[in-house]
Image (spheres, helix red, strand yellow):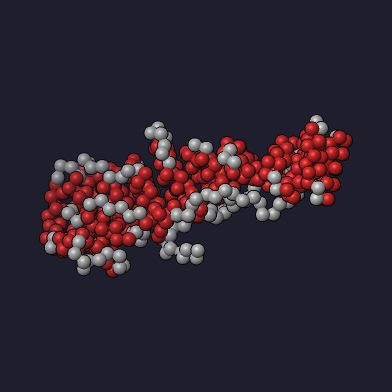
Amino acid sequence: MRIVSKMALAAALAGLTVAAPAFAKKEEKPAAPTEKATPAVQKAAFDAQKATDAGDLAAAVTGYQAAKAAMVSDDDKFMVGRVGYQIYQKNKDMALFSESIDLMLGSGKASPQAQQQLYFAQGQIAYNSKNYAKAITAFKGADAAGSTDPDLVPLLVEATALNGQTLEALNTLNAMVAKRVAAGQPVPAEWYQRGLSIGYKAKPNPADAPALSAATLEIGKKWVAADPQQRYWAAVLQIYEQQFKLTAEDRVDVLRLQRAANAMEGDADYREYADDVYLRFPNEAMQVLQEGAAKGVVNLNAKGDAADVMGIVKGKVAADKASLPAADKSSRAAANGKAALSTADAFVGYGDYAKAIDLYKVALAKGGVDVGTATLHMGWAQALSGDTAGAKTTFASVTGPKKPVADFWIIHLDHPTVPNTPKPAA
């Protein structure tokens, strides 16, 4: 039975609609340059400023237009832009605001600090008018000027995605996160949430799909490394599963990690886990269901799926455990490592990690098995046994399709899961 919980995914993507950005709460007057504008511009700008101060906004706009018509130099552009900005503060004309910012930035006369504010405001205006190409350029300009506005990166990423450049948006976010981490600065959870939302909802061209999934995966890995809360682990692993279209066998490997990370998401994960392993590994299934019941999320008393599976595995465990010594012996004599791999998995289910690790080595030596799977499972056994260093070394050697799960295991070992922090009251 295929059971997929939507709880974690909903938590990861909840409340992430990006509203039209608000403009800077503190509107500062751009610093004046030391250069002088031409006399005609100075006079018209002075008249416009005087009218603005007097509250005669119609005359102020007339003076602004006259000053703009007389511009011949970059100094003129900056002065006219400043006057236009001051008029905007009174009449709130967004078109005038946009034009004034463009003039000041186009003049090349704005100070680096002023550029931070001006580029960011230019990006906000363009974003609100759905001119995403211009918004991207402006937000990049603000970043280059040194802006640290907390909304800069989310808006840049969102504008890039809305401009049809989903992969570029995710790559930009990954680069910005890496930049922050390298500087020792915290990364807001909203950044990771926005990246996962963009990556999950995207409908890429077939040629872009692998790169887009890889970029989304990278965001997820960074998130649980930075903030390994239970809900984030569950969400990131579910998005990974769906983006990479994992098989049922691959999903079991994810559930084993999820269980070890204490990030099982409700009864659906416990029941799916048990459903997928009970025929081959009854004790593992029984332990999973018992754990879910102990946590109060799996009901073993009501007639149905979980209770039915528990009834089956309870009657199989004794005989299954008794068969392991013979399976161990025969797997070591087999021509290939398939039996050794399966028997090793069974030993893990009974907590005999030393025997399991030895048999994984037998399976790899004999061959005939998927090397990535056997290596991943050996790391699983080492991790559960408490051999963290050995497990990390083993996981680091995993290549191919199993590598993402191995990488997640290393993250889990380096950054143990923490309880969910309470969500802010609405």
Residue 15 location, x and y as percent?
Answer: 48, 54
Numbered label tally:
0
Residue 346 location, x and y as percent?
Answer: 20, 55
Residue 88 location, x and y as percent?
Answer: 73, 46
On screen, residue 389 above or below 93: below
On screen, residue 306 above or below 39: below
The image quadrant of residue 369 is top left
Residue 408 visible (yes or no): no
Residue in the foreground of this view, choosing between 421 and 328: 421
In percent of the image, x 28 and y 45: which residue is there? 247
Residue in the foreground of this view, choosing between 263 and 33: 33
- Is residue 112 shown left or right of residue 293? right
On screen, residue 177 above or below 307: above
The image quadrant of residue 380 is bottom left
In percent of the image, x 66 and y 54: which residue is there? 25
Residue 176 location, x and y as percent?
Answer: 55, 46
- Is residue 235 shown left or right of residue 27? left
